[in-house]
Image: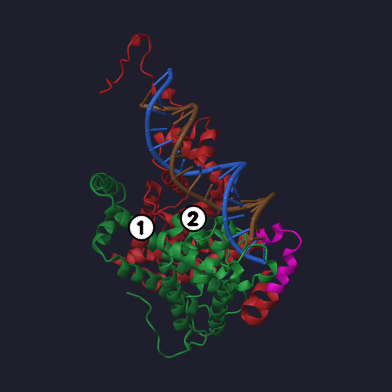
Chain colours: A red, B green, C blue, D brown
Amino acid sequence: MPSSESSGGSVWLRPERPPRDRQLTRERIVDVAAAVLDAEGHRGLSMRRVATELGVTAGSLYWYVHTKDDLLELALDRVLAEVRADPGTSDWRDGLAALARSNRAMLLRHRWALSELTVRPNLGPNALALAETGLRLLERAGFVGSDLDAAMAAVNDHVVGAVIAEVAWRDTLARMSGTGSGWDERAAEYLRQIAERHPTLAGRMAATGEIDVERESERRFAFGLGCLLDGLATRCATPFPSSRHRDAGSR
Amino acid sequence: MPSSESSGGSVWLRPERPPRDRQLTRERIVDVAAAVLDAEGHRGLSMRRVATELGVTAGSLYWYVHTKDDLLELALDRVLAEVRADPGTSDWRDGLAALARSNRAMLLRHRWALSELTVRPNLGPNALALAETGLRLLERAGFVGSDLDAAMAAVNDHVVGAVIAEVAWRDTLARMSGTGSGWDERAAEYLRQIAERHPTLAGRMAATGEIDVERESERRFAFGLGCLLDGLATRCATPFPSSRHRDAGSR
DNA sequence: ACCTGAACACCGTTCAAGT
DNA sequence: ACCTGAACACCGTTCAAGT
């Protein structure tokens, strides 16, 4: 029933508001959402927060985004664009390793993206592009059919799983050093119990106490990736496409 | 002992309320929290919900639990108790594979636990016990030092990563079939664009369209696990402890 | 010691109303 | 078309007050 524009009066003096009058864009919204997430994590993100950051009311955002979940989905795909991968790498092992490393680096930069992955399937354009280049590399290695899917999944799973473990580790350390007195006493008692019941674990915990988390995490990541790629190489048609065999972290 | 209910000034008839009068226990609280999480996921869990389920006010819970995060941490460790593992398995590959499978099964039963893992380090008793048996198996395989840690991490990472991917996949399918008309049209258009830009991916998506998700997920899991264990076997002192070599999913 | 009731400071989301 | 303002139905958490 509402005619599209004429509302009585001097319509001609008031031309159609050009699109550039819009204060918001989906892109701008995703921008600040990603920024807030990077700075303060999931806890810091709220519709009202994003809105005020844009000088706008919370309700306005729903003109551009269906729900907060949608916004998170967009933010996830945005950071996926940061992953660099070259589908044309001559050695498929090198290409996959580089893809995995770039993926890991991105997830470490935007740790909130991890919890997004566990909650939401991502079918955004960047996710699809990454899948394509990964599949191409594995296709060149000789994988076909459902083995191709399984191989791609195995590499991605290692990346995601490894970053989750690393972040959890880092958070534990941060929490330990964060809380001041009182923690150490209770922790000491707890560790004593652990040592009693779980000697092997206790030995490892004692050893990793003084280790650089960053270096050790990278070592573990490379170790697991190396195992995986070795296992893949024995299952495909082109185990050694190039003469040079890059070591990805065996002892 | 209904005397506890008699009021009216006769304090001497009313002995000190025994501990068993308490309506709440940390255990009961964690019980219903886990039940709510299983039934309705993260979205369904609130302090008020748990409280009313226990016939109590929300504030009461804070007598037993510091924060909602603490409650989630307790629920996570509770569900980790379901993972079964035998540290005495003769073949370390069999033992590790069984541990990984049991872990995966648990995570699929309690999918909310996944997002917990990404957000919170878990140092509960059950988590530690699982780590201990895993490390023992790998120790028997000949791993020592930081290679022991890396090997353990690699297996766990694969489990976590694989379940995350599987759950995401299942959710996508559920969402697709859930929304009725209108979805298919937009989806078809989207798929057309995918096929144009990402031929390899499109080929795989077409192939996996008619596949049983459950069976295929298990296949992928076993495939990746097999790759990983093969790679581990080439890096340890005891590659083949038993004569029988269980195939864990190579084509 | 254990629990209630009410409050505080937030949420996501909707929607009439304005321009 | 785009945004405001106010409302709705929730949150987690705290805390005086009761028993």
Residue B5 in picture, x, y percent from top left: 59, 67
Q: Amino acid at mark 1?
A: Asp
* Quadrant assignment, res B2: bottom right
Quadrant where the C terminus of chain B sits is bottom left
x 34%, y 9%: residue: A9
Residue projecting furthest to the right: A181
Q: Residues within 10 Å of mark 1 (few under 14, many from 20)?
A: some
x 54%, y 34%: residue: A52
x 37%, y 81%: residue: B247
* Quadrant assignment, res A6: top left
Residue A162 in picture, x, y percent from top left: 52, 63
Query: Who is closer to the viewer here, B139 or B87?
Result: B87
Confirm whether residue B76 shows in the render. Answer: no
Q: Is residue A78 above or below residue B176?
A: above
Marks 2 & 1 on one chain: no
Q: Which residue is mark 2?
A: A115
Pinpoint the chain carrying mark 1. Answer: B
Confirm whether residue B49 shows in the render. Answer: yes
Indicate yes or no whether the magenta region holds residue B79. Answer: no
- Residue range in magenta is A175-190
Mark-to-mark CA distance, 2 and 1: 15 Å
Quadrant where the N terminus of chain B sits is bottom right
Q: Residues within 10 Å of mark 2 (few under 14, many from 20)?
A: some
> Callout 1: helix, strand or loop?
helix
Residue A226 in picture, x, y percent from top left: 49, 69
Q: Is residue B200 above or below residue B85?
A: above
Pinpoint the chain carrying mark 2. Answer: A
Query: Who is closer to the viewer here, D16 or A82?
Result: D16
Q: Amino acid at mark 2?
A: Ser
Q: Which residue is mark 1?
A: B171
Lateral position of residue A187 relative to residue B48, left or right = right
Residue C11 in picture, x, y percent from top left: 51, 43
